[in-house]
Structures are given as C-alpha cells and as structure tokens.
Amino acid sequence: MIKIKPGKCDFCGCCVAVCPVDCIELKEADISIDYNICIDCKLCLYICPIEVFEDVETAEV
Amino acid sequence: MWRQRKFDLIVVGGGPAGTTAARYAAKAGINVLLLEKDRDIGVPVRCGEAASDEGLRIFVEPDPRWIKSVITKLRLISPNGRTIDVDLKQKGYILDRRIFDYDLAQYAAVEGAQIVCKAYVDGLLFDGDKVSGVKGEYLGEPFEVKSKLVIGADGVESRVGRWAGLNTVVKMKDMESAIQKTISGIEVNEHRFDFYMSREWAPGGYLWIFPKGPNAANIGLAVSGKYSRFRSAQRYLDDFLQKTFPDGSVVSTTVGGVPCDKTLKKFITHGLMLAGDSAHMVNPMTGGGIVPGMRGGMLAGETAAEAIKEGDTSEKYLNRYAKKWHKVGGRNHERFYSIKETVSKLTDEELNSICDAVEKIPPEERTIGKVFRKAIFKKPSLLVDVMKVFAGV
C-alpha cells in the first residue's frame, strides 16, 4: 500500500489531479490518504515530482 | 460578514483564472466572493512565470513591478547540444507571480469582489441537481455559503469539478510532472528563453531556463507521467543542475503538475463553470497556463454576470461560455495537443536531424513559423497540425 513520507510534501496537488478515486486530501500544508477509498493504483507514486510516496508491504503499516 | 451573506457568484481559487473571473463578474455588476485556500494570494508560486506581452495586454497593462525579464530571443538546444536561436516577433516576459497575482486580486477587489484567504472549500451545496454554494473551513470553523453560481478555478487538482460530477482527472500521459528551482549567482542571458529538448534531460517534456535578470533564473523541467514512474522529475533536474550550474544557489524550489491536455469536453454543469487549469485550459504544447487561464476566467466571469442578470444559471445557458472558449482558444489547443503528441514521440536522433535542418535557415530569417516549417520536412506527420496553427506566422 501507498504511504506518505513525512516532511517531504510540497502540497502541489499533482497526485490529487491523477487520483482516479479522489482519496487524497490536501489542505494548506497537510496531506492525507483515505485508505477506505484508495484502490492502491500507485499513480500518485508514479507522478510525484519529489518522491513523497512509497509503496510498502501492508504488514509494515 | 461574508459567511452570513448570499452571493450571486462564488469563485473558488485565487490564481489568475479565479481573480480574473471575479474581476470581470464584479465589473459587470454582480456580487462576488472569492475564496482562496492559502494564506496569501500569489504564494506559493507554482509556475515557470513566462507569458507573452501580447497575451497579457488583453487583460492588463504590463507593469515593471512584476516584470523580472523582457525576453526577445528563444534558444532551442538539441539532444546533441546544437543551439538554434530564434528572434521572437512578440516579446515575452518572466514575471514575478507573487506581485502579479496580488495585483490581479487587487483589480478584482477594486471592482467590488470580496476576497477571503485561508478559506478551504471542501464541498459543494446543491439545490436538486444544481450547484447552489460551497462549504468548507475558515480558521478552524466550518462554513456554508449560498450562491446562484460557482466558478471552480481551483487548479490542476480541481475537486470542485469532481464534486459536481465533472471528470477532471488528468490522464497520466497528459500530466507533466514538473519541478523548478530558482537559481541565483549564475550568469544567464537575461533576454532569452532556453529550451532543452531531449529524452535524456526530460522525456515527454522539456527543460527550461527562464532568466530573472542577468544573475538568476527559473530552471525547471517537466517529465510526462508516461515516464515519471521510472525516474522522478527531481532526479532529472538535480542531474542537470549538477552538470550545468554546480555553484549556483537554490533560492526557491517549486513542484507541480501541468495538465498538457485538450480542454475538458465538459467543464460546465447546472450552476457551475470551471476555468483555467481545472478545465485543462493550459496550452498543451508549451505548458503555458497564465494567459489561457485569464482568458477562461474572463469569459466565465462575463458569462456569470449575464446568467445572473437573465436569471438563468442552467447548464444550457452557461454553455455560452464553452462556445466562446472554443472559439477563441479551444480549437487551437486541440491542434497544439496534436503537435505535442507528435513531438513527444520524436527520438533524440530525429530531434537532432530536425535541428540540423533548421540550422540552415539564416539566423536573421528565423521565426517560430519557419522553424516549424523546416521541421515538417523532416517529420511530415507534423504537417497538418503545424500548418493549421502557424498559417500566417
């Protein structure tokens, strides 16, 4: 599953724009994923210019 | 207090599209509220900050306070390092978007629009199937404000559109994953745009150097979402900077997504219009979105005022806005999109051979139109689209 690395995000909205299910919430300086909606498609991981996301084994979370 | 009032129009987002929409709507006499989620208009800057004099003049008189560089030349750098300089027929600018955006907000406020920052919109209000306002959070407190119309100018991530059932999702291949650093303490030609075209530097996009005076520049690149999964934009840029400007100081870093797509098929619904990046109004070939965003904003703002006065905010009425957009820019954007599609498929060898051909045009006779015409001979599939866009250039 996709995890957000703390402290890295610049809050640009690039991931929100490609997310097919609108599961990323982005406020002024706050980002979170709603895991009830996330389908683990990884597009956010693939598009992020600065590698904010990482793909981790479910057991690690 | 804005939270207790009802408005004719609420604009979500305080970038150039939003403030321009608010300005023209207020000017036409309707009451307008603009909500911006960040604490300042114009900050953070997520932009290469380039715009043409001709495009800006449609809306504003260029002001030295927000012009960092006047650009008269363009340089293309081929994958093998060959440079081609082209004189620009019309000058361009590198702006200071912090001051520029702030001024645009000022114009809207002077026309009577009310602007509120730190107002985070997290949903729409509906009256049946018609959008009838927004809800959100302001300084930790929830709010709901009713309006006859809403304009979503909430940028590339446009959730306003999604909440109303419009499909604003950007396809990966059309999303450019971009990063830019403002580098200081370097020497650059302050009157020239530099574009590096190569799969090695920026696959499916390009790398730019936009000067901000003689000793600083916005240096950035965009990588298509088709390729960004294999290597991030940040890594490409760090490589380039390490090789080219190892001693420069990074005074600012910005990242973002650029929707290099055709304008959305549907960016209007009952009580709602989208403008700017949210409607995918960026020029898909250049990635430039300031002037198209302002154009969309102006048309949406004017249409909003007409709709309010006519008492008809239905999708059918608001479609006038889509028609106007299509007439002034949308159709060209479709052609720019085709060119982008063709150019992004060129291999480095093909780009080199096009540059070799273009180099044979004497420098004093080079125009963007001629450069494209020469490129066509090397890559005939570009012909139809380029002819349509540059006929008469």
Image (spheres, grey):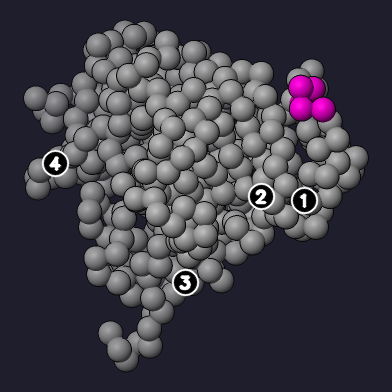
Please identify the quadrant where the C terminus of chain B is shown: top right
The amino acid marked with disc number 1 is: Leu
Report whether mark 1 lies on the same chain as mark 2: yes
Which residue does the image show at 60% across and 58% down from the upper left?
Answer: B201
User: Would you say residue B378 is visible in this rendering?
Assistant: yes
Circles 4 and 1: CB atoms closer than 8 Å: no
Q: Which residue is mark 3?
A: A42
Please identify the quadrant where the N terminus of chain B is shown: top left
Question: Between marks 3 and 2, how big is the CA–CA gap?
Answer: 28 Å
Q: Earlier in the sequence, mark 4 or mark 1?
A: 4
User: Would you say residue B337 is visible in this rendering?
Assistant: no
The amino acid marked with disc number 2 is: Met
Circles 1 and 2: CB atoms closer than 8 Å: yes
Question: Between marks 1 and 2, how big is the CA–CA gap?
Answer: 8 Å
Q: Which residue is mark 2?
A: B197
Question: Between marks 1 and 3, how big is the CA–CA gap?
Answer: 32 Å
Specify the subunit that label 3 lies on.
A
Question: Between marks 3 and 4, how big is the CA–CA gap?
Answer: 32 Å
Residue B256 coordinates in the image, percent (x, y): 42, 50
